[in-house]
Image (cartoon, grey):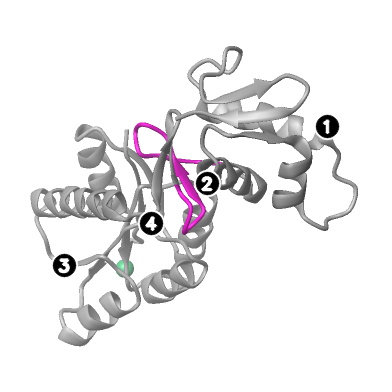
Amino acid sequence: MDRLLIVEDEIALAEGLKDNFEFEGFEVLVATDGETGMRMALAEKMDIIILDIMLPKKSGFDICKELRARGQGTPIIMLTARTEEVDRVLGLELGADDYVPKPFSTRELIARVKAVLRRSRDKREKQTNIYNVGKIKVDFEHYIAYDRDDHQIDMTFKEFEILKFFMMNKARTVSRDELLDKVWGYEIYPTSRTVDNHIVKLRKKIEEDPETPRHILTVYGIGYKYIE
Ligand code: CA
């Protein structure tokens, strides 16, 4: 289910959109001011954001700019009552994916949302840095991981680094010491137990059945081997 955040201070409009998008199968969250919207956009893993421009406390432009500055790439569709070309250009320059002037038909907005989602998925799949790792997809360039439904999942920096190392050393047995050296480097106090703990967590994320791993295999007495 795609998760949609609507940031809109006209409550009747926001509620109406929420109903319509829920009917379309979206999970919808609503924020009615800019600060709350910003907080929710950062805290919740959303698939797309519908963002009004004129908002109390923080404008849609500022939210868009700030999210992009923080490396947050969630697709954004901007709404505005103002129809000047300058808004459209500014919105897109700040990193919005599309722009819908008010008044709009709900049907049109739904179509735009679906188009933007489709586009962002295509783009993601075309990037060469996305790899299938077990049951997940990993974007090593942006340090983002997705499940089968294309929803972002939580991964730590170390987990990304371990997977990257495995991807570069497919089907080769790597010792715990080698992993410690390549992934942890000069950090203080990691032990082979640290490696094992990370492997347990990674298996939970990428393996169908973490108890009987098919990708990250244990090589007894030595370390691990990654099999595609
Ligand atoms: Ca408004």
Report ligand 1 position as a quadrant: bottom left
Residue position for label 1: 193
Of mark 3 and mark 1, the one earlier in the sequence is 3
Q: CA distance from mark 4 to mark 2?
A: 28 Å
Viewer-nearest residue: 18 or 170: 170
Residue position for label 2: 168
- Residue 115 to residue 173: above or below: below
Q: Say which quarter of the image contains residue 190.
A: top right
Q: Residue at x 24, y 47 (%)?
A: 17
Q: Is residue 100 left or right of residue 95?
A: left
Q: CA distance from mark 4 to mark 1?
A: 36 Å
In percent of width and height, residue 49 lies at 34, 55
Q: Residue at x 89, y 53 (%)?
A: 188
Magenta-span inclusion, residue 150: yes
User: Could you classify mark 2 by the number of other residues whose Cα lies within 10 Å: few (under 14), some (14-19), or many (20 or more)?
Assistant: few
- Residue 59 to residue 165: above or below: below
Q: Amino acid at mark 3?
A: Lys
Q: Is residue 129 left or right of residue 211?
A: left
Disc sitting over residue 102 in the figure = 3
Task: Point out the image quarter for the C terminus.
Answer: top left
Disc sitting over residue 74 in the figure = 4
Between circles 3 and 1, the one closer to the viewer is: 1
Secondary structure of the residue carrying numbered label 2:
helix
The region drawn magenta spans 139-154
Q: Amino acid at mark 2?
A: Met
Q: Residue at x 32, y 39 (%)?
A: 2
Q: CA distance from mark 1 to mark 2?
A: 23 Å
Q: Is residue 69 left or right of residue 212?
A: left
In percent of width and height, residue 166 lies at 57, 40
Q: Amino acid at mark 4?
A: Thr
